[in-house]
Image (spheres, rainbow, N blue to C red):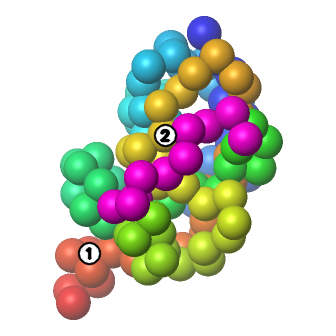
Amino acid sequence: MTTIKILPHPELCPQGAEIQSLPGNTLCEALLDNHIAIEHACDQSCACTTCHVIVREGFNSLPAAEENEEDLLDRAWGLEPHSRLSCQVMVSNTPLTIEIPRYTINHARENH
């Protein structure tokens, strides 16, 4: 099992959390499996930015983002150098610390 630390988020995880996940799961799956309701409007198909996270620790252990993910991240709210889409990050054996941005762009929910 791999430890994933989630920094406090005012709505999804006010106190922060520390969860465990099996390597091979996506980060999005790990969050959802542990009752952290991160948005995932495209059902984890790498077609939106609602599951955007910032990897604060463990970023260098992750494989580089593929071109499609990079293109989508350009549209994410609060983009930072260590931003990733949680649906594209495979959990490995390296512990991660992540931050879920306060806002997300969800055109379906916002009636765009």
Span colored in magenta: 60-69
Residue to which mark 1 is pinned: 109
Please tell me which residue is depicted at 68% across the width and 70% down the height of the picture: 80
Q: Position of residue 83 (x, y in %)?
A: 61, 60
Q: Residue at x 41, y 44 (%)?
A: 88
Mark 2 vs 1, N-terminal side: 2
- Residue sitting at x 45%, y 65%: 70
Question: Across the whole image, how many numbered discs are drawn on residues?
Answer: 2
Q: Is residue 95 visible?
A: yes
Q: Nearer the viewer, residue 69 or 39?
A: 69
Please tell me whether residue 67 belongs to the stretch shown in magenta.
Answer: yes
Q: Residue at x 44, y 19 (%)?
A: 24
- The furthest residue to the right: 57
- Seen from this angle, which residue lies furthest top? 1
- Residue 16 visible at all: no
Coordinates of residue 110 in the picture (x, y in percent): 29, 83
Q: Give x and y (percent) for residue 77.
A: 53, 78
**Secondary structure at numbered mark 2:** loop
Number of residues whose C-alpha sits closer than 10 Å to that of mark 2, classed few (under 14), some (14–19) or many (20 or more): some
Three-letter code, disc 2: Val
Disc 2: which residue:
89
Q: Tag 1: Cα neighbours inside 10 Å, few (<14), some, or many (≥20)?
A: few
> Image quadrant of residue 3?
top right
83 to 60, vertically: above or below: below
